[in-house]
Structure formats: C-alpha cells, structure tokens
Amino acid sequence: MDDVFQWILRLDALEAAPLILGLELRAGRCSGRIVEVEAYREDDPASHCFRGRTPRNAPMFLCGGHLYVYRSYGVHWCLNLVTGKEGEGQALLIRALEPTEGQAIMRQRRGQVPERRLCAGPGNLCRALGIDGSFSGERLGRRVHLCGVPGAAESVAQGPRIGITQGRDRPWRFYLEQSAYLSRPGIAAKPVTSPHARDT
DNA sequence: ATTGGGATTAGCT
DNA sequence: GCTAATCCCAATG
C-alpha cells in the first residue's frame, strides 16, 4: 500500500498535488487530512531550489517520498513532501490539515485555538504535529506517514500561491474547495476536478 | 564580515 | 492593514 504513495510522489509536483489532497498525514499520535498544498519546482523563482543546491534545500533534490523541513522567518517550521525523481528539486508544501486524531495533543502544543485553526497554515501544522528541522531529509514512513485512498478527494481547486513575491503567475496552490480548514479562503479558484467529474 | 530578504504568524490598529 | 519575532542563505565588500 505504501508503494502507491511512493509512486505518486515520484510524479511531477503538479501531477502529484491533486492526488495527495484528501490523504491523511500522521506524525506520532496526531493526524489530519491534507486539504491544501503548494507546488515548488527548480525552474521556479519562488522555490528554494531556484539558485541550485544548498545545505538547507539539499533534501529537495532527493527522490520523491523524502521530507524537506525549513525554518520560515526564523520562527516557524514548514513541511514539504519531496516529489519527482532524484536531482529534480521539487516538493509540495503542506499548508493545511483537517485534524482527525490527537486534537488534544495539538491543542497542548498550539494553545487554545478553534479546531479549524489548529493546523491552518504551514507553520501552525508543524507546531501542532511536533515537526521540526530534525525531520528534514528523513524518509516518509519513519516519523511521518501517509494513509488513505489517493485521488479520492472531492472538488480540488487551484489558485495563486500565498506569501510569495516572485512566481505569482503560477497558480500552483491546490486545495479542497469546500474545506473549512484552509489557511485562507480560495482566491479566484478554478476547479480541477468537480464532485461529478469522476462519475463520467 | 556584513546586509537584505523571505514558501509565516499573532496581536494590535 | 501593520509589525515584530528572528534564522538561513546569497550577494556584496
């Protein structure tokens, strides 16, 4: 079953993104459904890989299925699932989860916040799941796991990425349109798959 | 050796 | 809407 995820994560980030949405991400006793991701690639001015390999971004150049965790603004940790083949330098930034298990522990780490804010935002979800820089470069399946049925998510939407100054023209943020657990509401979304598209 | 700029967030105006 | 918190990297002298 894990082979399915390995296969998906070796696809290009843009192909993998809609398949990853809806899967459950678990770390320790906490888990949540992935409702929002963003794709970053080497040919992409917004990506940490844009100017080649450095000690920080080295895990992004491993093959799909590894983790890349970086420190944001010197304050927060952010989790990526590396995609593609070794040397390509691409990943999916996990931006929001719908908490499904371990909410009590999450709240202990995050403080008294409403359920829909527990894992909303890349920094917040790492805090909630206890993910830090020591996870970077690690293989999926050690301390972080995926489970669920890939590609089964209801209406996936696509829009501009958040918080970047370069590469704004690339609509590489993917999210579950009806989710109440997004880091921010969808902006000028265009649907990728609709609930009825799969029926045909 | 120093400097400027982020794939962010909470709290305040 | 604005700002501070504060670390890593890249570009520059």
Image (cartoon, coloured by chain):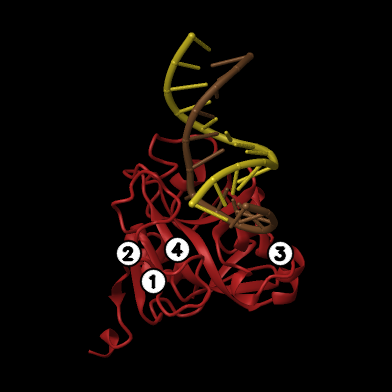
Chain colours: A red, B brown, C yellow
Identify the image quadrant of residue A73.
top right
On screen, residue A171 above or below B7: below
Q: Name the residue at 31% across, 59% down.
A: A171
Mark 2 — on which chain does it sit? A
Disc sitting over residue A15 in the figure: 2
Disc sitting over residue A110 in the figure: 3
Identify the image quadrant of residue A83.
bottom left
Residue at mark 4 shares a chain with residue at mark 3: yes
Q: Looking at the image, is mark 1 or mark 4 earlier in the sequence?
A: 1
**Amino acid at circle 1:** Leu
Q: Residue furthest left?
A: A200
In the image, A198 versus A188, the foreground residue is: A188
* In this picture, residue B8 sits left or right of residue A188: right
Residue at mark 1 shares a chain with residue at mark 2: yes
Q: Secondary structure at mark 4?
A: strand
Distance of mark 2 from mark 4, alpha carbons?
A: 12 Å
Q: Looking at the image, is mark 2 or mark 4 earlier in the sequence?
A: 2
Distance of mark 4 from mark 3, alpha carbons?
A: 21 Å
Q: Looking at the image, is mark 3 or mark 2 earlier in the sequence?
A: 2
On screen, residue A126 above or below A193: above
Distance of mark 1 from mark 2, alpha carbons?
A: 7 Å
Q: Which residue is mark 4?
A: A37
Q: Name the residue at 30% across, 54% down.
A: A170
Q: Position of residue A145 (x, y in %)?
A: 58, 68
Q: Secondary structure at mark 1?
A: helix
Discs 4/3, front: 3
- Number of marks drawn: 4
**Amino acid at circle 4:** Val
Which quadrant, please, contains the C terminus of chain A?
bottom left
Q: Secondary structure at mark 2?
A: helix
Mark 1 — on which chain does it sit? A
Q: Which residue is mark 1?
A: A19
